[in-house]
Image (cartoon, rainbow, N blue to C red):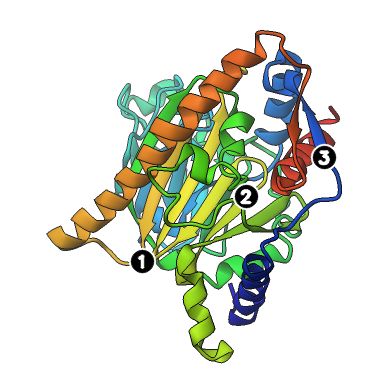
């Protein structure tokens, strides 16, 4: 984020605090409960949002150097992400073209991949470069049996994949004005510290809703983060279907003691970007959190979440590791022990027939924008 934008955000937040007000939307939004439970709606979302749109699958630091690779399965597809010898990011389906076995697991570095089933060998560029008993497959041209490529792009330090083979990655307008802002964080220099995968009994949109308002901070999080942040206070700005929320820490008042041109705003806020449809990028302190939230393909009342904490430098000392581990533990505590149990209770309540709609108030503009974007994309 550029300095000028940071200053404008600080002005807005300090004004809200001084006037004891907050940013409000124009009207209350009523969200149908069925969109969290309906299988037909879930099928539309799967097709339109999770197979036809670019998906963010990580940060550049997940593939730190040429030859590195990483597997990615959270999207319900076997993805293989690679850093080519020339530094280019490419993606493939992690499927051997002989009998369909996975050709890679986990993450690492090397010059290519060997299928564990029959030892077909693939180059880092996906080409089939060797197979035992090659004469038995003389009628099968190697060129026709390369790993299946997926359109991929690396922008502003983020890795993007088009999840359907043969479809182009229409990225020219995907991030729009937000791309320049994200580039200002220099995300390409961040390194992954730890990844956790969570499976919870709540719809993927309900999981994402957790991040979209601070109205609950000093109620649900009264013993964890309430003392750190201003309650029920944030800016909201949309960029097409994407949007940004900025919530001030209580330390933001310290800026008033300095000349405006000397303000360092980011240490006094948490910045949350929702990269439509399912990625939550959180900047706070010196760390970046990347949440990838996916629906369960078979059950709209369940979801899978993958959290990765990224740090600005490689973690090389025990003291540094302990610091980042405490941060990761706090993030997980807040969502695992406070947010998601409430969300799972909400999901169970949807089945009780108590209401046809839930309500997003004037102070919950981001929630309304997100669900309107889902409805617009899926035609629901």
Residue 134 visible at all: yes
Sequence-wise, which precedes: disc 1 or disc 3? Answer: 3
Of 373 and 75, which appears nearest the observer? 373
Can you say which quadrant of the picture contains the C terminus?
top right
Of 152 and 86, which appears nearest the observer? 152
Query: Above or below — where is 243 with respect to 252?
Result: above
Query: Above or below — where is 345 with respect to 212?
Result: above
Can you say which quadrant of the picture contains the N terminus?
bottom right
Q: Select label 3 or label 2 by which is in front.
A: 3
Query: Given the current orientation, which residue lies at the most extreme left position?
Result: 318
Name the residue that disc number 2 marks. Answer: 274
Name the residue that disc number 3 marks. Answer: 28
Query: Above or below — where is 371 with respect to 282?
Result: above
Name the residue that disc number 1 marks. Answer: 312
For the point 66% across and 62% down, the residue is 20
Query: Above or below — where is 314 with respect to 265?
Result: above
Residue 97 visible at all: no
Give percent across and percent down for residue 303. 53, 25
Of 276 and 272, which appears nearest the observer? 272
For the point 28% across and 55% down, the residue is 324
Left or right of 365 in this view: 266: left
Give percent across and percent down for residue 246. 59, 60
Sequence-wise, which precedes: disc 1 or disc 2? Answer: 2
For the point 51% across and 19% down, the residue is 201
Q: CA distance from mark 1 to mark 3?
A: 40 Å
Q: CA distance from mark 1 to mark 2?
A: 21 Å
User: Which quadrant of the figure has residue 153?
Assistant: bottom right
Give percent across and percent down for residue 229. 49, 57
């Amino acid at each position: 984020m550029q300095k000028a934008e940071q200053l404008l955000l600080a002005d807005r937040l300090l004004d809200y605090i001084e006037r004891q007000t907050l940013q409000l939307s124009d009207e209350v939004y009523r969200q149908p409960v069925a969109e969290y439970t309906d299988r037909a709606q879930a099928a539309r979302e799967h097709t339109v949002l999770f197979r036809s749109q670019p998906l963010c699958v990580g940060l550049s630091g997940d593939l730190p150097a040429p030859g590195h690779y990483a597997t990615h399965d959270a999207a319900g597809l076997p993805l293989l992400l690679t850093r080519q010898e020339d530094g280019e990011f490419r993606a493939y389906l992690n499927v051997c073209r002989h009998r369909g076995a996975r050709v890679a697991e986990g993450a690492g570095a090397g010059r290519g991949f060997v299928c564990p089933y029959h030892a077909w060998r693939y180059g880092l560029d996906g080409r089939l470069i060797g197979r035992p008993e090659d004469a038995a497959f003389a009628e099968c041209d190697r060129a026709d049996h390369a790993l299946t490529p997926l359109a991929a792009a690396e922008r502003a330090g983020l890795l993007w994949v088009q999840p359907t083979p043969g479809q182009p990655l229409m990225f020219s307008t995907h991030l729009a004005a937000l791309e320049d802002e994200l580039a200002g964080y220099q995300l390409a220099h961040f390194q992954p510290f730890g990844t956790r995968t969570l499976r919870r009994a709540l719809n993927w949109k309900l999981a994402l809703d957790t991040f979209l308002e601070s109205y609950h901070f000093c109620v649900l999080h009264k013993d964890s983060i309430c003392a750190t942040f201003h309650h029920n206070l944030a800016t909201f700005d949309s960029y097409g279907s994407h949007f940004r929320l900025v919530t001030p820490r209580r330390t933001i008042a310290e800026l008033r003691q300095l000349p405006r041109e000397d303000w360092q705003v980011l240490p006094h806020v948490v910045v949350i970007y929702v990269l439509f449809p399912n990625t939550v990028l959180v900047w706070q302190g010196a760390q970046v959190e990347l949440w990838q939230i996916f629906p369960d393909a078979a059950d709209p009342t369940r979801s899978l979440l993958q959290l990765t904490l990224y740090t600005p430098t490689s973690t090389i000392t025990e003291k540094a590791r302990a610091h980042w581990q405490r941060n990761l533990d706090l993030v997980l505590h807040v969502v695992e022990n406070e947010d998601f149990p409430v969300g799972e209770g909400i999901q169970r309540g949807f089945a009780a027939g108590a209401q046809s709609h839930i309500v997003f108030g004037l102070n919950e503009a981001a929630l309304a924008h997100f669900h309107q974007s889902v409805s617009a994309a899926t035609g629901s």
